[in-house]
Amino acid sequence: MQRLWKIFSKGLISENPLLMLMIGLCSAVAVTSSVANAIGMGAAMTFVIVFAEFVISLFRKLIPNDARIPIFIIVIAAFTTIIDLSMKAYFPELSKSLGVFIPLIVVNCIIMGRVEAFASKEKPLDAVIDALGMGIGYTWVLVGIAAFRELLGNGTLLGAQIMPEAFQPILFFTLSPGGFMVFALFISFNIWLKKTLDKRSAGAAKEAA
Amino acid sequence: MKKDIIKLGLALALFAAGACVALAMVYTVTKPAIDGHEARNLAESLQDIFPEADDFVDVNGELVSSEPGVTISGAWKAIKGDAILGVALRVLGKSYGGDAAMLVGVGTDRRIAGIRILVLSDTPGLGANATSPAYFVDKSSKTTFPGQFTDKPVSDPFEVKNDIAAITASTITSKALTLMAKRAGDAGVAWLEKAAAGGM
């Protein structure tokens, strides 16, 4: 149980795909101008990574090493298309506002990276737990950045007016440069958080000894 | 070596076949819902532009665009009884984020009856504001970007930042959509004139 928790929790902070591994950044800056988009993107990407890691881990012994990358892409692309079609059918508004970023999950390096580094070597249960951790780690960062940017850049949260009428939205935060800046703030915050947590667990270990 | 290639190819083919079956199933399940959304969207937008019309008749193929980058992919005449109220065109063009599609209604008074943006994949928070009902190019009168075209005479110049208010920081989107509206307006007026003369 503790082992699974370790696999799961590393995606949240200490090996967060966006803030620590720093992969999959392009889509993250692009979709975080509104919270609704960030939630949709996070959910879609979590769906794809969970199923891709599960399937690849399940068949890991049948996948020849030399052909593994094309096979990974087939599996990831299939699940991406499934989520793209389902969103078009059941969440047309969300699908419209996320536009091209859903099909682009295929080339999201987080999924490719985790499939290659983790799922192709580990058992299905571990792979699913790892995927959940990574997916949720990705989603919380997206939603956090989006909340920051939407609030300051548009005065709203999830489309509802939060800031007083007199507040003049700072367009900078909606534009990509603002996205990069908020991203950098999140990275430094996460590094601080990781250091604090590491120190605390080191202290606890010392006490136990 | 040769045996290896066959083995690799076989493995690839196997996974591709599996993916194909899964996708075919999802496609069959979702297709009616997706088509339904599109048809409903179109019907709602048409009725929205010509609220008085009691029927829309497909007249696609009778209208031509004067601009190579803007194509007309559908056209419907709005009729009430025997009278033509106007014509609605579905035009395709290119905007900042790729393909854009919109529905442009032209009334018999040679004014734009209304514009609805159907497809636009521009940047959320910027160009995508064109489709937002809460984004106003004129805050005092609560006019949205497509809203400012309503009742505008087609013979107007349609120049962004002149007689068309642009979306903040999205000049490319504004210009692209305005050009589509203008060309659709021109084609619509030309068709209406022909219809009035020839009794189509």
Image (cartoon, rainbow, N blue to C red):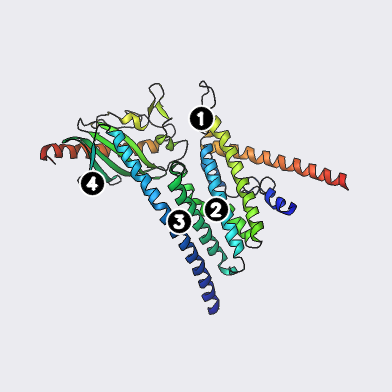
Q: Position of residue A144 (x, y in %)?
A: 60, 38
User: Marks 4 and 1: in contact by CB < 8 Å?
Assistant: no
Host chain of mark 4: B
Q: Position of residue B37 (x, y in %)?
A: 38, 45
Q: Position of residue B5 (x, y in %)?
A: 53, 75
Residue placed farthest to the left in the image? B198
Q: Which mark is residue A68?
A: none
What is the CA distance from the residue labelled 2 to the residue labelled 4? Answer: 40 Å
- What is the secondary structure assignment of the residue under circle 3? helix
Residue neighbourhood size for the residue with mark 1, other residues' Cα within 10 Å, grouped as few (<14), some (14–19), many (≥20): few
Question: Which mark is nearer the camera, 3 or 1?
Answer: 3
What is the CA distance from the residue labelled 3 to the residue labelled 1? Answer: 34 Å
Q: Which mark is residue A48?
A: 2
Picture residue at 62% right of the left edge, 68% below the top? A61
Q: In this view of the protein, which residue sits in the foreground, A29 or B157?
A: A29
What is the CA distance from the residue labelled 2 to the residue labelled 1? Answer: 29 Å
* Number of marks in picture: 4
Please indicate whether residue B32 sits to the left or right of residue B9 in the image.
left
Residue behind mark 1: A160
What is the CA distance from the residue labelled 1 to the residue labelled 4? Answer: 41 Å
Q: In this view of the protein, which residue sits in the foreground, A82 or A187?
A: A82
Picture residue at 60% right of the left edge, 50% below the top? A23
Picture residue at 53% right of the left edge, 70% below the top? B11
Quarter placement of the C terminus of chain B: top left
Residue behind mark 4: B60
- What is the secondary structure assignment of the residue under circle 4? loop
User: Marks 1 and 2: in contact by CB < 8 Å?
Assistant: no
Q: Amino acid at mark 4?
A: Asn
Residue behind mark 3: B26
